[in-house]
């Protein structure tokens, strides 16, 4: 199973961008998205930005990931 995660583009330097996943920042390759701009959201898979994503959808997805992480933490705490 693969997991692609939305990230906010913070800066672009040539073929790479600094992106923010909400709790982590990473450098990813953006060669597949030549018209990408700072401030846009992208779907990142294995270090590559593979698709643009609308901001509202990205924020919903990130909120769901956060909710799932909190639920897992709560479950571990209750064991």
Image: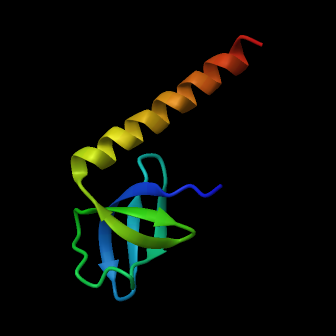
What is the quadrant of residue 35 in the picture? bottom left
Depicted 76 relative to depicted 62: above or below: above
Percent from the top left, x then y, of residue 38?
23, 69
Q: The C terminus appears in which quarter of the rendering?
A: top right
Percent from the top left, x then y, of residue 29?
45, 79
x 39%, y 79%: residue: 30
Q: Residue furthest front?
A: 1
x 56%, y 32%: residue: 69
x 57%, y 69%: residue: 46
Q: Residue furthest top?
A: 78
What is the quadrant of residue 1 in the picture? bottom right
Depicted 58 relative to depicted 43: above or below: above
Is residue 38 found left or right of 18 in the rendered image? left
Q: Residue furthest bottom?
A: 14
Percent from the top left, x then y, of residue 15?
39, 87
Q: How many marks?
A: 0
x 47%, y 46%: residue: 23
What is the quadrant of residue 51 in the picture? bottom left
Q: Nearer the viewer, residue 34 or 10?
A: 34
Percent from the top left, x then y, of residue 74?
62, 18
Depicted 53 relative to depicted 28: above or below: above
Q: How is the image coloured?
A: rainbow
């Amino acid at each position: 199973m693969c997991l692609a995660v939305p990230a906010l583009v913070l800066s672009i330097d040539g073929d790479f961008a600094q992106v923010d996943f909400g709790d982590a920042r990473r450098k990813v390759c953006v060669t597949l998205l030549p018209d990408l701009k700072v401030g846009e959201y992208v779907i990142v898979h294995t270090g590559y930005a593979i698709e643009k994503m609308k901001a509202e959808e990205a924020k919903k997805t990130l909120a769901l990931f956060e909710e799932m992480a909190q639920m897992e933490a709560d479950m571990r705490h209750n064991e």
